Image (cartoon, rainbow, N blue to C red):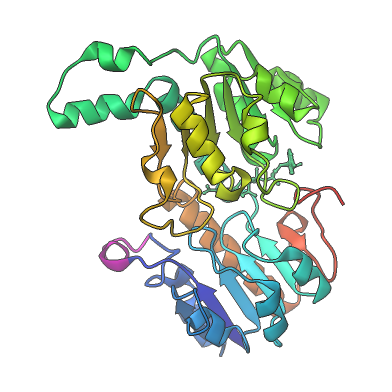
């Protein structure tokens, strides 16, 4: 059996830090095991264009392992060429880089390591909310420059206490964000999700559901995006929706870059409609050097909390998703049932309700 894994290059960091398991160098820790079982493992970061290793090896691979941090985009075209492909395993959470409808049509299963990095992301969201609201990045940059002008940063720094924070998507990550915000004494915690939280769960964090999205954003000082990318969320935060945001709201998106319209966000930040935008996910990954989100600023020269896609790939998370990817593969090899929570697409149908209402 041929297993193809598209992972990110770890370089010297991965050679010096073996816990960077999700890299080309450390191969999710599965190489020796697969070799002992008599299987072939091809690992590469080369994923774009017809000459990439991804496109070369997908034609006869039976198993594809990808990671959202360096997504191998498995389009319908490629699925049609992948005659042996039976199962796609996402080492992490979020399988939008795979054309899931095409996987359904071709009876290719898609599994994720659900829950593996949800705390990692929730912590990053809370940090990003705080760094925007408190105007942290410009304050730190000032210090590195050798300056000391308290008013220049204090003029745009606020407390999170007393603000209204809302999450688009209240699943594993969104709910953990709400839980972590409880001690900050926000004025209100809101959520927008077609799946209502169980009553006890909503009560435990005192979260109120708002069913209309424009209505929801118009009430929030901070909006955090925590839903998967699918047909119903692509470009969801566009110029029309941004016009309904409170003026000077902060937006944090660690879900997927393409849920927010790239140019609409940059314009909203430049005009001051948004006071800040932070996150780690981009509409194309790796993000090109000239991507506007790298350098966009609010009218006071701050409000940018962008980083590369790493919130869900902490060393703690890598241990969990490497183990999880291995168990999915073991189950596949033995023909044992998969854990239901990991199955996104089963044989010919969606097994989750999180990737859109069907
Ligand atoms: P989950 O499946 O537990 O929760 C997703 C929630 O979003 C569900 O409650 C679902 O009903 C809701 N949802 C779906 N479509 C929606 C819509 N149109 N409007 C409002 N709500 C909607 O997923 P989990 O574990 O919370 O992860 C969410 C997403 O976060 C992943 O799909 C992935 O894209 C992203 N993620 C990012 C990571 C990073 O490193 N930046 C790491 C892990 C996940």
Q: Nearer the viewer, residue 212 or 239?
A: 239
Where residue 229 sits: x, y (%)?
66, 50
Nearest to the observer: residue 32 or residue 248 = 248
**Residue at image point 51% right, 58% down:** 284
Q: How many labels were placed on the picture? A: 0
Classify residue 36 as left or right of residue 178: left
How far across and how far down the image is residue 45, in percent?
A: 44, 73
Question: Does 82 appear above or below 236?
Answer: below
Q: Position of residue 147 (x, y in %)?
A: 14, 23
**Furthest residue in direction left, as rendered:** 146
Magenta stretch: dominant SS? helix
Residue closer to the observer: 349 or 287: 287
Part of the protein shown in magenta: 11-19
**Residue 274 lies within the magenta run:** no
Q: Quadrant of the N terminus?
A: bottom right
Could one spot residue 65 in this view of the protein? yes
Answer above or below: position of 59 versus 115. Answer: below
Residue 25, image quadrant: bottom left
Is residue 69 placed above or below 242 in the rendered structure? below
Q: Quadrant of residue 158?
A: top left
In-front residue for pair 300/135 = 300
Residue at position x 34%, y 64% from top?
18
Ligand 1 is in which quadrant of the figure? top right
Task: Give the percent coordinates (x, y) of residue 334.
Answer: 71, 78
């Amino acid at each position: 059996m041929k297993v193809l894994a598209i992972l990110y290059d770890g370089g010297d960091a991965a050679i010096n830090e073996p816990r960077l398991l999700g890299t080309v160098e450390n191969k999710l820790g599965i190489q020796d095991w697969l070799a002992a079982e008599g299987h072939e493992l091809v690992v590469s970061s080369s994923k774009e264009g017809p000459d990439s290793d991804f496109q070369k090896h997908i034609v006869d691979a039976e198993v594809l392992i990808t990671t959202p941090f360096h997504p191998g985009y498995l389009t319908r075209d490629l699925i049609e060429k992948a005659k042996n492909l039976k199962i796609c395993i996402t080492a992490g959470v979020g399988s939008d880089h795979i054309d899931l409808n095409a996987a359904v049509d071709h009876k290719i299963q898609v599994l994720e390591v659900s829950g593996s990095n949800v705390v990692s992301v929730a912590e990053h969201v809370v940090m990003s909310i705080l760094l925007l609201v408190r105007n942290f990045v410009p304050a730190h940059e000032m210090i590195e420059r050798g300056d000391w002008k308290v008013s220049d940063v204090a003029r745009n720094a606020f407390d999170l206490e007393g603000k209204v924070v809302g999450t688009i998507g209240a699943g594993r990550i969104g709910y953990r964000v709400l839980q972590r915000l409880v001690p900050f004494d926000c004025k209100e915690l809101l959520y927008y999700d077609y799946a209502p939280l169980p009553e006890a769960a909503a009560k435990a964090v005192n979260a109120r559901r708002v069913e209309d999205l424009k209505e929801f954003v118009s009430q929030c000082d901070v909006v955090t995006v925590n839903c998967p990318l699918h047909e119903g969320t692509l470009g969801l935060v566009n110029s029309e929706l941004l016009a309904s945001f409170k003026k000077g709201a902060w937006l944090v998106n660690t879900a997927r870059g393409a849920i927010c319209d790239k140019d609409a966000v940059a314009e909203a930040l430049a005009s001051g409609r948004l006071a800040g935008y932070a996150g780690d996910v981009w509409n194309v990954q790796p993000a090109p050097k000239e991507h506007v989100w790298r350098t966009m600023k609010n009218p006071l020269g701050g409000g940018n909390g962008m980083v590369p896609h790493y919130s869900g790939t902490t060393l703690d998370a890598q241990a969990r998703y490497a183990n999880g990817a291995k168990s999915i593969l073991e189950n596949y090899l033995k023909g044992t049932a998969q854990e239901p929570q990991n199955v996104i697409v089963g044989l010919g149908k969606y097994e989750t309700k999180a990737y859109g209402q069907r």
